[in-house]
Image (tube, helix red, strand yellow):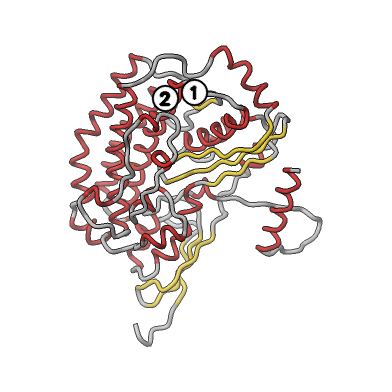
Amino acid sequence: MAGKAPYIVPVGPIHPALKEPVHIELTVVGEEVISADFTPGQTHRGIEWMGLSRNPVQIVHLTDRICGICGVTHSLSFARAVEQIADITVPERGDYVRTIIAEFERIQSHLLWAGVAAHELGFDTLFYLAWRVREEAMDAIEVITGNRVNYDIIQIGGTRRDITEDQHAKIRKCLNTYKDLFAKLKKLFLEDAVIKSRCVGTGLLSFETAMAYSAVGPTSRASGVTADLRVDYPYCAYGDLDIKPVIPTIYGSDVNGDTYDRIVVRIFEVAQSIEIIETCLDNMPQGPVIWEEKVAKILSTCKKASGEAVGRHEAPRGEAVHYVAMDGAEAPIAWKVKASSYSNLHVWPIILKGAQLADIPVIVASVDPCMSCTDRVAITDNGSTKIFTKEHLAKMSYEKSRRMMQ
């Protein structure tokens, strides 16, 4: 390394190794990354702004479009926030249906990620296998919701669809398929010599750094952080379930916080989600999924609601947060979304430092980034060509938020 001059390697915003636009700038000496930075902002769509001209029931439909993989994540988080403000209760059966669809979303999201990780390693046979078996979860989601993407099953006060007895057999068939495949998937992803050589010891994120940077979900649990919203602050049906956060020791290994550990956590979370769904099906309470006699009142109740609340959900990538403020008008006066990727992307400069160029794609992918969930922007037209600094934009955001809450 001595005597070699550093040079800049730009990756993105459009690059074959990136599934969504983001600009990553790497400072490299030889083949080693000595520093890294990233610039998001290429996929902002103004969804929060659009929501402020709609009523809460309409916004639920919009939240499903924030992410094509984690639709339930955002619709459930938003609905929970509004339900707190408007004091709307969800029937117990509705909570169970919410839990089942959320766990199916976790399964398909983790399998999608596993396929992408395999592809980034050049293991395309495993990529095709992971995505083929993911279809089982997508089929089960379609059975329950009628859709494969943008499920539109969450409604303020419950769910739009129930899980009927005749659907149980199809759902259990899917779960049994995964139980039969789990040993094979575990062997392919966790025992393959090439995957081990490429992932063990790369993308290191220590427990202390994960805590300091507020990493969430599998990214933090792979570093030994036992934080899981479903366990720490149970909601929906999770309070009735005996679940524990999945960390790498479940595979009988030490916690290293590397790319390999992040694979371990996601593979075993698939198995955990299967158990959760089976338990929910076995113990599904009787009754409605939404108080039918109150459906007509939900919209009017939401319109008249006043207050603020935070809705949270343990998404496949980690904790997602929706902040909603209402003042008795039809539309919210504030709606802010903090997706899990917003927290996890900030560890990129840490885990990329010291990496080899060839390992960058899988390390970047190891936090399971979602740029469409993350990107936010605020634009103020003051009739001038002034370029605002980061500090000025932050100040304007604070002042606007205060005005909205007065």
- Give the position of the N terminus as an image quadrant: bottom left
- Closer-to-camera residue (68/345): 345
Q: Earlier in the sequence, mark 1 or mark 2?
A: 2
Q: Position of residue 92 (x, y in %)?
A: 44, 22
Residue type (three-letter) at the residue carrying disc 1: Thr
4 to 253, vertically: above or below: below
Badge 1 element: strand
Three-letter code, disc 2: Val
Determine which quarter of the picture holds residue 209: bottom left
Label 1 close to label 2 by CB (< 8 Å) = yes
Residue 86 percent across, percent down from the top left? 62, 28
Residue at 36% across / 73% down in the picture?
Answer: 32
> Residue at (22%, 39%) from the top-left corner?
182
Question: Which mark is drawn over residue 159?
Answer: 1
Residue 229 appears at what percent x and percent y? 43, 42
Mark 2 element type: helix
| Residue in the image at 34% along x and 63% along y | 204
Q: Nearer the viewer, residue 100 or 152?
A: 100
Q: Nearer the viewer, residue 270 or 365?
A: 270
Where residue 66 sits in the image (x, y, percent)? 53, 40
Instruction: Identify the image quadrant of the C terminus.
Output: top right
Q: CA distance from mark 1 to mark 2?
A: 7 Å
Q: Which mark is residue 86?
A: none
Relative vertical location of residue 313 with respect to residue 377 in this rendering, above or below: above
Residue 97 disc label: 2
Q: Quadrant of residue 299?
A: top right
